[in-house]
Image (tube, grey):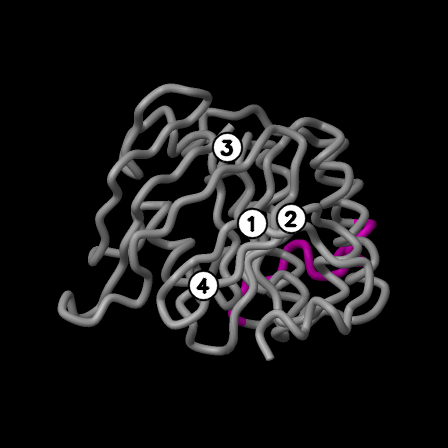
Amino acid sequence: MLEVEHLSAWYDRKNPVVRDASFGISPGEAVGLIGVNGAGKTTMLKALCHAHRGCSVGALRYRGRPVTPATAAFKRQRYLALAEDSSFPTWSLDTFVRFLGRAYGARRRARLLDELVEGFDFGRYRGAPFASLSSGSRKKASLIAAFHAQVDILLLDEPVDFLDFSATEYLYQRILAAKEHGQAVLLSSHIAESFTRCTSRLLVLSSGSLSAPVPTPADSRDVASLIA
């Protein structure tokens, strides 16, 4: 689904945050991105989405075809849900979903949207402006929009942050459903359970270098040991 070769990202070009990273994700697969705070996970995800200026990529292929992060056909089939997002503070979820429908050229899926709103227990906030929401509710809105988009490639940056137990469990269910639907998922997290529950492989980002993929350990303690 997605192949990345020699991706680098920086704030100061002399000191890249990510150096020469290469990896791939197949349809129906969830891959975890793990690293300590400040390792560059968010920067790497933003670089893939043309949302970080300081970056370069040797080759990027979507479904076998060469693209760039700015290629329109690629942009319509990838979605990045950031760990924290203060965009569109006066908008509500319904307004945001309508906007995404126009931006991605996708039809509104009313039944799916209702299902996601119920699953994340977001009904009473559906018409509320984002600026009025708690961090947890704002995160739920971001995830609802991400899963409603139904794109081929879903990039989730710290999706568990700010969620309560029931919302976290529902998040895991939606990631597994996305895999069954054939979507490719790349998620970063500091919660080892996110990886043991949802992913088959892990990429370790350390000191700017990305490891070759390793099978996701069954035990959360073994996941944590990868960055110890």
153 or 37, nearer to the observer: 37
Residue under label 1 = 213
- Give the mark nearer the N terminus: 4 vs 2: 4
**Residue type marked 4:** Lys
Residue 50 in picture, x, y percent from top left: 30, 46
**Residue type marked 3:** Gly
Position of 181 relative to 45 (above/below): above
Residue under label 3 = 101
Residue 193 in picture, x, y percent from top left: 77, 65
- Asked if disc 2 and disc 3 are in contact, CB closer than 8 Å, the reply is no
- Asked if disc 3 and disc 1 are in contact, CB closer than 8 Å, the reply is no
Instruction: Measure how far apart labels 3 and 1 are at the Cα level.
Output: 34 Å
Q: In which quarter of the image is residue 32?
A: bottom right
**Residue type marked 2:** Arg
Sort mark 1 into few (<14), some (14-19) or many (20+) by Cα contacts within 10 Å: some
| Element assignment for label 2 | strand
- Asked if disc 4 and disc 2 are in contact, CB closer than 8 Å, the reply is no
Q: In this view, does 66 lie to the left or right of 180?
A: left
- Asked if disc 1 and disc 2 are in contact, CB closer than 8 Å, the reply is yes
Instruction: Measure how far apart labels 2 and 3 are at the Cα level.
Output: 31 Å
Q: Give the range drawn in magenta.
A: 118-131
| Element assignment for label 4 | helix
Position of 60 relative to 140 (above/below): above
